Image (cartoon, grey):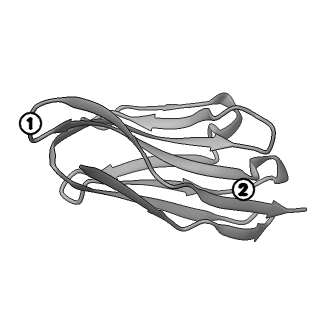
Amino acid sequence: QVQLVESGGGLVQAGGSLRLSCAASGSIFKINDMGWYEQAPGKQRELVASITSDGSTTYVDSVKGRFAISRDNTKNTVYLQMNSLKPEDTAVYYCHAHVVTLTRFTFNYWGQGTQVTVSS
């Protein structure tokens, strides 16, 4: 079993910053891609940013220049630094990890979600 535990969400005014963290633990052999997704009310879950095991990153256009994803492979943790936040960034943010377990099977795992609310 693998668990992803997120932290760092909250309420912030427009223009402010938040840093999300997601720590993976359990039967982990290796973590491939990690990423952050957002889900606003009534909408589908969508990718915000992702990072490979060697640090290559991708971002959705709407967050380029404002958000930065990073990871610490020694801690099995991924971060999302969110700057210049806008009301439209309001959503539940989910951490995702593509994990190779100790049994060498590969699974996708999700965190429980953390609410980010940006007031205008």
Q: Establish if 111 lies above or below 47.
A: below
Q: Establish if 101 lies above or below 115.
A: above
Name the residue located 83 percent from the left edge and 53 percent from the top edge.
87
Secondary structure under tag 1 reads: loop
Q: Position of residue 116 (x, y in %)?
A: 69, 60
Using the rendered image of the protein, determine whether residue 14 is visible from the camera's viewpoint: no
Which quadrant of the figure has residue 25?
A: bottom left
Secondary structure under tag 2 reads: loop
Using the rendered image of the protein, determine whether residue 96 is visible from the camera's viewpoint: yes
Horizontal side, residue 12 vs residue 59: left or right: right
Q: Tell me which amino acid carries mark 1.
A: Thr
Q: Quadrant of the C terminus?
A: bottom right
Q: Tell me which amino acid carries mark 2.
A: Ser
Calculate the distance from the C-alpha at mark 1 to the C-alpha at mark 2: 42 Å
Badge 1: residue crowd in 10 Å (few <14, some 14–19, many ≥20)? few
Name the residue located 74 percent from the left edge and 70 percent from the top edge.
11
Q: Residue furthest right?
A: 120
Q: Which mark is residue 84?
A: 2
Q: Residue furthest left?
A: 103
Residue named by callout 1 = 103
Q: Position of residue 96 (x, y in %)?
A: 43, 42
Which quadrant of the figure has residue 82?
A: bottom right
Horizontal side, residue 48 vs residue 58: left or right: right
Residue depth check, mark 1 versus mark 2: number of the one nearer the observer: 1
